[in-house]
Image (spheres, helix red, strand yellow):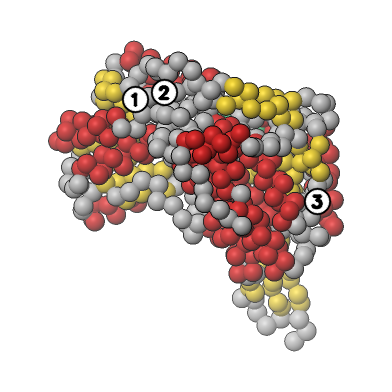
Amino acid sequence: MVTDSPKTLADWQALAATLNLETRAFIDGEFVPAVSGSTLTSINPATGETLAEVASCDTADAERATQVARAAFESGAWSRCDPGKRKRVLLRLAELVNAHRDELALLDTLDMGKPISSSQGDVAGTVACLRYQAECIDKLYGEVAPTGDGALGLVLREPMGVVAAIVPWNFPLMMTSWKIAPALAAGNSVILKPSEKSPLSALRLAQLVQEAGIPPGVFQVLPGYGHTVGKALALSMEVDCLAFTGSTGVGKQLMQYAGQSNLKRVFLECGGKSPNIVFADCQQLDAVAQSAAAAIFHNQGEVCIAGSRLLVENSIREDFVARVVKAAEQMQPGDPLDPNSFMGAMVDEAQYQRVLDYIRLGVSEGAALKLGGEASASKGYFLPPTIFDNVTPEMRIGREEIFGPVLSVFGFDSEEQAIALANDSDYGLAAGVWSQDIDRIMRVSRRLQSGQVYVNNWAGVDQTVPFGGVKQSGNGRDKSLHAQEKYCEVKTVWMSLSV
Ligand code: NAD
């Protein structure tokens, strides 16, 4: 039975006190310690306190899990079962996630510091993703090729085999669902490697997978570090596909591992430095400024599609930046368990220090600090919204992915200059265009080198549209029918007919 969600900070704290954390790996349908017995420490970044000691898997665990996954795939219990059955089981999993939504949201907030309201949104997104991909299972058809009379050419979609999903910590459960829902729906065996910084919701999900009735070995979870168990999965000859979300640097390593092993497919969803372009003709500047601030400060700026480069037409820049500053002043970090907090804590000390280093760099590079800067909280890794104006393309704060609450504002004088500035990046994940001129919107949208372009909004989302990047932001597409198709191999069956 689904009950009402907690409403206050005290309600969430009370629920947190009742949690019973699963900390072991999930292999072959059972929860087990790592073969080595090693653990890693999961901390709550809002308090610095230890949450749990979680199994830290390694090569031996990866070898076992890949063998189990292969055997489960070959058995056909999931890969060749009636698609209607796969659909029913995945829909059941969606309902179980929905029924346990508060607990799952809480695990992500405790583990990585994001505000509880954001985690609740992530769980709702996870349920929607599971439902959508489950519903697609019996709606994706093969093809009959337009051959001549003497032959029948069938084009079949088949599951690939063993998929290893390696995911980051910024949206732990939701990024997981974007990989596992379409991969499982297509009939693959899936091994999930959550980030070492946020493994708890993945392990709770494994319990729900068991309850939903997914056969043993079809879904497994290996918590642990990237350079140990992640690398072992990426180099494994038993893994047919790597589905990765994370940094561009690690994405490049995964392509090398694929080349060193079995040429497994590698789908990458990587970083970004996304431009958000505001033209002087746009109206309702306060609402636009509010959206521009939320585009970077949502989830403490730890968002792949953060609108981290704000490009503003110079004729309105001074006025517009003042409005963004005013909006951002209301977005100060607070207790992640407080439903009113817009920002929470940075994921850990390393990320906190990295962002602080970028803020100091921005000052030394000569950008104009308009808001924020140094941290003030005495405990936990909290950073304020920070805004730099007068940023130029040579400055590192304007080029590199900071992955924190730091906005770089650039000025421009013409449409051509705006497009050139926007595309002057190694990345191509998201871009925004704010204007009332439909001709301009179409011209600019077509020329932006970006996986998605948001027109008069930021981060409009739905399960029906694909999500992914171009250039060094990656090559895969999550969500929509395209996601399920990418976890299938296309096979031709050519039949000669006697005529
Ligand atoms: P990361 O690349 O450090 O780690 C991502 C995952 O890869 C983790 O599970 C990690 O353990 C694993 N890993 C690290 N080294 C590995 C190795 N050598 N072999 C195998 N696995 C390895 O990224 P992060 O810090 O967890 O996440 C932040 C990054 O993710 C940012 O760059 C952000 O833009 C990106 N991201 C992209 C999207 C998208 O959809 N494009 C979404 C969310 C986050």
Which quadrant contains ligand 1? top right
Examine the image and state in which quarter residue 321 appears: top left
| Residue neighbourhood size for the residue with mark 3, other residues' Cα within 10 Å, grouped as few (<14), some (14–19), many (≥20) | many
Q: Which mark is residue 383?
A: 2
Asked whether the residues under the numbered discs 2 and 3 touch, taking CB atoms below 8 Å apart as contact, a structural biologist would say no
Q: Residue at x 74, y 25 (%)?
A: 39
173 up-or-down from 318: above or below: below
Q: Nearer the viewer, residue 449 or 357?
A: 357
- Give the alpha-carbon distance from disc 2 to disc 3, as whole Å: 43 Å
Amino acid of disc 1? Thr
- Give the alpha-carbon distance from disc 3 to disc 1, as whole Å: 48 Å
Q: Residue at x 68, y 83 (%)?
A: 149
Which mark's residue is nearer the viewer, 2 or 1?
A: 2
Amino acid of disc 2? Leu
The answer to whether one can see residue 301 in this image is no
State the residue lying farthest toward the left. 315
Q: Residue at x 57, y 26 (%)?
A: 44
Q: Circle 1 is placed at which residue position?
A: 386
Q: Nearer the viewer, residue 265 or 465?
A: 465
Label 1: which secondary element: strand
Label 3: which secondary element: loop
Instruction: Find residue 264 and report its horizontal and vertical position in percent.
Output: 70, 44
Q: Which mark is residue 216?
A: 3
Amino acid of disc 3? Pro
Asked whether the residues under the numbered discs 2 and 1 touch, taking CB atoms below 8 Å apart as contact, a structural biologist would say yes
The answer to whether one can see residue 135 in this image is yes
Left or right: 275, with 190 as reference point: left
The tag earlier along the polypeptide, 3 or 1, is 3
